[in-house]
Image (cartoon, rainbow, N blue to C red):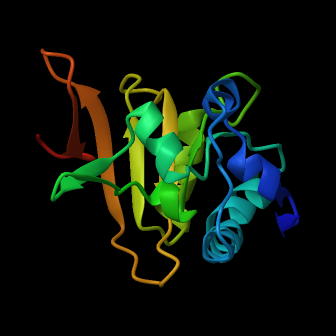
Amino acid sequence: MKLSKNLSLSEMTKSQTASRRGIDNSPTPEHIESMKIFAEKIFQPIRDHFGVSISISSGYRSKSLNKAIGGAHKVVDGEYVATSQHCKGEAIDIDRDYANAPNNSQVFHYIKDNLDFDQLIWEFGNEENPSWVHVSYDADGDQRGQILVAYKNKSGKTKYKVYGGED
Protein backbone atom coordinates (compact mmCIF):
# COMPACT_ATOMS: atom_id res chain seq x y z
CA MET A 1 0.00 0.00 0.00
CA LYS A 2 1.28 3.46 -0.91
CA LEU A 3 0.95 6.27 1.61
CA SER A 4 2.30 8.79 -0.92
CA LYS A 5 4.06 8.71 -4.28
CA ASN A 6 7.36 7.68 -2.67
CA LEU A 7 6.37 6.12 0.66
CA SER A 8 4.91 2.68 1.25
CA LEU A 9 3.19 1.32 4.32
CA SER A 10 5.88 -1.37 4.59
CA GLU A 11 8.59 1.34 4.84
CA MET A 12 6.67 3.03 7.67
CA THR A 13 6.20 -0.19 9.64
CA LYS A 14 9.49 -2.03 9.08
CA SER A 15 11.43 -2.76 12.24
CA GLN A 16 14.41 -4.99 12.79
CA THR A 17 13.56 -5.16 16.49
CA ALA A 18 9.99 -6.26 15.75
CA SER A 19 11.25 -8.90 13.29
CA ARG A 20 13.93 -10.16 15.65
CA ARG A 21 11.60 -10.37 18.65
CA GLY A 22 8.45 -11.50 16.86
CA ILE A 23 6.54 -8.32 17.77
CA ASP A 24 3.42 -7.51 15.78
CA ASN A 25 3.89 -4.01 14.34
CA SER A 26 0.62 -3.80 12.42
CA PRO A 27 -1.10 -0.42 12.43
CA THR A 28 -4.83 0.15 12.83
CA PRO A 29 -6.81 1.82 10.02
CA GLU A 30 -6.71 5.06 12.06
CA HIS A 31 -2.91 4.86 12.24
CA ILE A 32 -2.75 4.32 8.48
CA GLU A 33 -4.85 7.45 7.92
CA SER A 34 -2.45 9.41 10.15
CA MET A 35 0.49 8.02 8.16
CA LYS A 36 -1.12 9.20 4.91
CA ILE A 37 -1.45 12.73 6.30
CA PHE A 38 2.13 12.59 7.57
CA ALA A 39 3.37 11.38 4.18
CA GLU A 40 1.56 14.24 2.40
CA LYS A 41 2.63 17.00 4.79
CA ILE A 42 6.16 15.91 5.75
CA PHE A 43 7.69 12.95 3.94
CA GLN A 44 6.74 13.72 0.34
CA PRO A 45 7.79 17.40 0.46
CA ILE A 46 11.23 16.34 1.78
CA ARG A 47 11.53 13.66 -0.92
CA ASP A 48 10.41 16.04 -3.67
CA HIS A 49 12.73 18.84 -2.53
CA PHE A 50 15.90 16.76 -2.39
CA GLY A 51 15.02 14.33 -5.19
CA VAL A 52 16.68 11.38 -3.45
CA SER A 53 15.47 8.39 -1.46
CA ILE A 54 14.69 9.20 2.15
CA SER A 55 15.16 6.20 4.40
CA ILE A 56 13.15 5.94 7.57
CA SER A 57 15.17 4.50 10.45
CA SER A 58 12.07 4.43 12.67
CA GLY A 59 8.48 4.96 11.62
CA TYR A 60 5.29 3.51 13.04
CA ARG A 61 5.64 1.61 16.33
CA SER A 62 3.03 -0.58 17.96
CA LYS A 63 2.69 -0.24 21.72
CA SER A 64 4.64 -3.50 22.17
CA LEU A 65 7.46 -2.36 19.90
CA ASN A 66 7.62 1.03 21.62
CA LYS A 67 7.94 -0.72 24.97
CA ALA A 68 10.64 -3.07 23.64
CA ILE A 69 12.83 -0.22 22.39
CA GLY A 70 12.25 2.08 25.38
CA GLY A 71 10.25 4.69 23.45
CA ALA A 72 8.43 7.60 25.06
CA HIS A 73 5.82 6.46 27.56
CA LYS A 74 4.31 7.01 30.97
CA VAL A 75 2.80 4.71 33.57
CA VAL A 76 -0.80 5.44 34.55
CA ASP A 77 -2.33 3.43 37.39
CA GLY A 78 0.38 0.81 36.90
CA GLU A 79 -0.31 0.50 33.15
CA TYR A 80 2.21 1.23 30.38
CA VAL A 81 0.94 4.02 28.10
CA ALA A 82 2.94 4.75 24.96
CA THR A 83 3.19 8.52 24.41
CA SER A 84 5.47 8.52 21.37
CA GLN A 85 3.94 10.00 18.23
CA HIS A 86 5.53 7.06 16.40
CA CYS A 87 2.74 4.97 17.97
CA LYS A 88 0.11 7.12 16.26
CA GLY A 89 1.75 6.99 12.82
CA GLU A 90 2.64 10.67 13.19
CA ALA A 91 6.46 10.57 13.37
CA ILE A 92 9.57 9.28 11.66
CA ASP A 93 13.28 9.30 12.26
CA ILE A 94 15.43 10.05 9.21
CA ASP A 95 19.11 9.17 8.92
CA ARG A 96 20.81 10.31 5.69
CA ASP A 97 24.43 10.11 6.80
CA TYR A 98 24.96 6.76 5.12
CA ALA A 99 24.60 8.32 1.66
CA ASN A 100 25.49 11.35 -0.42
CA ALA A 101 23.79 14.70 0.16
CA PRO A 102 21.59 15.72 1.74
CA ASN A 103 23.01 14.99 5.17
CA ASN A 104 20.97 15.01 8.36
CA SER A 105 21.66 18.69 9.03
CA GLN A 106 20.40 19.69 5.58
CA VAL A 107 17.21 17.66 6.09
CA PHE A 108 16.71 19.20 9.56
CA HIS A 109 17.11 22.76 8.26
CA TYR A 110 14.86 22.15 5.25
CA ILE A 111 12.07 20.93 7.56
CA LYS A 112 12.65 23.79 10.04
CA ASP A 113 12.58 26.47 7.36
CA ASN A 114 9.92 25.12 5.00
CA LEU A 115 7.41 22.74 6.58
CA ASP A 116 4.65 22.96 9.14
CA PHE A 117 5.45 20.33 11.79
CA ASP A 118 4.54 19.40 15.33
CA GLN A 119 7.98 18.49 16.63
CA LEU A 120 11.47 18.52 15.11
CA ILE A 121 14.40 17.08 17.05
CA TRP A 122 18.14 17.31 16.32
CA GLU A 123 18.95 13.89 17.75
CA PHE A 124 22.39 13.78 19.39
CA GLY A 125 25.36 14.10 17.03
CA ASN A 126 27.34 17.34 17.22
CA GLU A 127 26.86 21.02 16.42
CA GLU A 128 27.37 20.41 12.69
CA ASN A 129 25.19 17.35 12.16
CA PRO A 130 22.68 15.34 14.19
CA SER A 131 22.97 11.55 14.36
CA TRP A 132 19.41 11.47 12.97
CA VAL A 133 16.37 13.75 12.64
CA HIS A 134 13.04 13.13 14.35
CA VAL A 135 10.01 14.89 12.87
CA SER A 136 6.32 14.61 13.73
CA TYR A 137 3.06 15.98 12.39
CA ASP A 138 -0.15 16.00 14.41
CA ALA A 139 -2.78 14.41 12.15
CA ASP A 140 -5.47 16.52 13.85
CA GLY A 141 -3.72 19.61 12.50
CA ASP A 142 -2.59 21.24 15.75
CA GLN A 143 1.15 21.75 15.13
CA ARG A 144 3.31 23.03 17.99
CA GLY A 145 6.32 23.88 15.84
CA GLN A 146 8.51 22.65 18.70
CA ILE A 147 12.24 22.40 17.88
CA LEU A 148 14.50 20.52 20.29
CA VAL A 149 17.99 19.09 20.61
CA ALA A 150 18.45 15.66 22.25
CA TYR A 151 21.59 15.05 24.28
CA LYS A 152 22.88 12.80 27.06
CA ASN A 153 23.53 14.29 30.47
CA LYS A 154 26.50 13.25 32.64
CA SER A 155 24.64 10.19 33.94
CA GLY A 156 23.79 9.07 30.40
CA LYS A 157 20.10 10.00 30.55
CA THR A 158 18.55 11.51 27.42
CA LYS A 159 17.55 15.13 27.89
CA TYR A 160 16.11 17.78 25.58
CA LYS A 161 16.74 21.48 25.24
CA VAL A 162 15.13 24.07 23.01
CA TYR A 163 16.98 24.39 19.71
CA GLY A 164 19.15 27.50 19.88
CA GLY A 165 18.37 27.85 23.58
CA GLU A 166 19.56 26.68 26.96
CA ASP A 167 18.66 23.52 28.94
Quarter containing the C terminus? top left
Foreground of the two, 68 or 55 = 68
Residue 35 in the image: state x and y as whole percent: 66, 67
Number of marks drawn? 0
Q: Is residue 164 above or below residue 45?
A: above
Q: Is residue 21 above or below residue 32?
A: above
Foreground of the two, 83 or 154 = 83
In the image: residue 147, left or right of residue 46: left
Q: Is residue 154 above or below residue 68?
A: above
Residue 89 in the image: state x and y as whole percent: 58, 63
Foreground of the two, 4 or 164 = 4
Residue 163 in the image: state x and y as whole percent: 27, 47
Q: Residue at x 40, y 76 (%)?
A: 143
Quarter containing the N terminus? bottom right
Residue 56 in the image: state x and y as whole percent: 67, 42
Q: Residue at x 49, y 26 (%)?
A: 131
Q: Residue at x 12, y 42 (%)?
A: 166
In the image: residue 77, left or right of residue 138: left
In the image: residue 39, left or right of residue 137: right
Q: Residue furthest front?
A: 78
